[in-house]
Image (cartoon, rainbow, N blue to C red):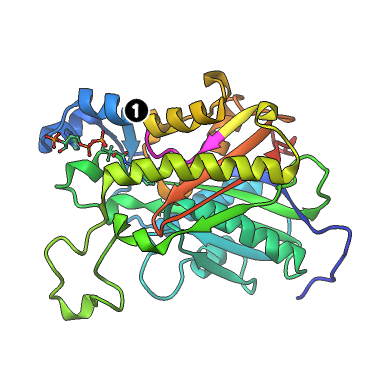
């Protein structure tokens, strides 16, 4: 049922968070046994020690469901008016995965759709959820970021197989006021399709159809030009972070916690250095979970809230960069959550 538009409650306010990773852990030693790589290379070049990988039969919707369920519980199981799922690895090309996840969560009848913005998907989803709330389409939105990157990465490609992993994170947002804890500040987004080739799965879409079964070798897999992606990630996340902080009226010195997309520990350090954010104010879980795509930021928020490195009152800067190219940043003051 459409909600009644209320002028005064137009901001999106975080009321719950949840994260989930599949139980199966893959270590650097496991990867070194089947790839020309080493624990030392992976640790020093990426900061990753372990990652979680889905088991046979499991799909992105399973990850999304579990993270969504936890976020709803954390928010006190509110009445949800829309479900947004950011993912690059939907269960199938058509239809979207969000309606399936919504139905499994008992949310039949609400609008539910996917967002495709690769590793920036959660921030694109945040802007979309905020828009659904501001327009009066929904008063409470479940936003999930979930990816099973190991299903599209070439297991023989050492430059991507050691980085990308599987997981999910979610937040619940409700209509509220811009000056209350949990309110999401202006979400700054950007894209540059001229460099789409840097991060892509060339086949399986309308250009190289999966039906033809004749795509170029390797084109069914995720491909990334690491070095240039690295450079762009540092530049875009730093610049857009400054814009988001300025848009909300803060300074970089106000930031208590940086929650950046966990792409590579060296990227995280370079971004934090550029923004002059001290090491103690940077949230990180990359050593344990790797790069989980659209799940990265909400999973980081959930795990950081759980281990108390993120607590009520912290002023948080979120930023992400990924394929498209696409990027974004936003701010929020971490709220006191009902179930925390
Ligand atoms: O999620 C959003 C977007 N993704 C990112 O932001 C990721 C961005 N890129 C990266 O994180 C890094 O570029 C990588 C981790 C992918 C690669 O690290 P790098 O330090 O940029 O290495 P490189 O690509 O410059 O390669 C250096 C060397 C090469 O060997 P040669 O040509 O110097 O002999 C690679 O072949 O390292 C080699 N190499 C590896 N060696 C051992 C690449 N991957 C591996 C590996 N193990 N897994």
Q: Residue at x 28, y 42 (%)?
A: 227
Answer left or right for 130 relative to 166: right
Disc 1: which residue? 47
The residue range painted magenta reads 259-264
Specify the quadrant of the image occupied by residue 74. Answer: top right
Q: Is residue 261 magenta?
A: yes
Please tell me which residue lies in front, 251 or 56.
251
Specify the quadrant of the image occupied by residue 131. Answer: bottom right
Question: The residue tagged with tag 1: helix, strand or loop?
Answer: loop
Q: Residue at x 39, y 45 (%)?
A: 232
The image position of residue 137, as x and y in percent, is 73, 70
Which quarter of the image is occupied by the N terminus?
bottom right
Task: State whether the magenta stretch is mostly helix, strand or loop.
Answer: loop
Question: So how many labels did they put on this image?
Answer: 1
Specify the quadrant of the image occupied by residue 94. Answer: bottom left
Answer left or right for 81 relative to 35: right
Residue 19 seen from this side: no
Residue 69 seen from this side: yes
Which quarter of the image is occupied by the C terminus?
top right
Answer left or right for 212 relative to 245: left
Q: Residue at x 45, y 48 (%)?
A: 321
Question: Against 292, is 326 above or below?
Answer: below
Q: Residue at x 56, y 20 (%)?
A: 278
């Amino acid at each position: 049922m459409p909600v009644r538009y209320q002028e005064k409650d137009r901001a999106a306010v975080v009321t719950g968070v949840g994260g989930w990773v599949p139980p199966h852990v893959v270590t650097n030693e496991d990867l070194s046994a089947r790839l020309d790589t080493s624990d030392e290379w992976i640790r020093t070049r990426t900061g990753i020690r372990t990652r979680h990988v889905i088991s046979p039969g499991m799909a992105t919707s399973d990850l999304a469901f579990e993270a969504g369920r936890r976020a709803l519980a954390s928010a006190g199981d509110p009445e949800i008016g829309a479900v947004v799922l950011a993912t690059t690895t939907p269960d199938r090309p058509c239809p979207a995965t969000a309606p399936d996840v919504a139905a499994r969560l008992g949310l039949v009848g609400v609008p539910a759709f996917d967002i495709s913005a690769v590793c920036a998907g959660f921030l694109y989803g945040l802007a979309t959820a905020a828009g659904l709330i501001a327009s009066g389409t929904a008063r409470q939105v479940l936003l999930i970021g979930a990816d099973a990157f190991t299903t599209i990465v070439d297991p023989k490609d050492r430059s991507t197989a050691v980085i990308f992993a599987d997981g999910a994170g979610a937040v619940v947002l409700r209509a509220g006021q811009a000056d209350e804890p949990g309110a999401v500040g202006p979400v700054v987004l950007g894209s540059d399709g001229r460099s789409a080739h840097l991060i892509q799965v060339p086949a399986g879409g309308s250009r190289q159809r999966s039906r033809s079964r004749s795509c170029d070798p390797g084109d069914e897999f995720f491909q990334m030009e690491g070095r240039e992606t690295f450079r762009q990630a540092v530049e875009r996340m730093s610049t857009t972070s400054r814009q988001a902080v300025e848009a909300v009226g803060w300074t970089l010195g106000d930031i208590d916690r940086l929650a950046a997309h966990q792409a590579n520990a060296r990227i995280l350090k370079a971004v934090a250095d550029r923004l002059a954010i001290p090491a103690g104010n940077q949230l990180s879980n990359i050593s344990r979970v790797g790069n989980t795509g659209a799940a990265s930021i909400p999973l980081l928020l959930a795990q950081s809230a759980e281990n108390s490195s993120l607590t009520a009152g912290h002023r948080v800067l979120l930023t992400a960069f990924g394929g498209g190219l696409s990027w974004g940043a936003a701010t929020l003051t971490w709220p006191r959550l009902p179930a925390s």
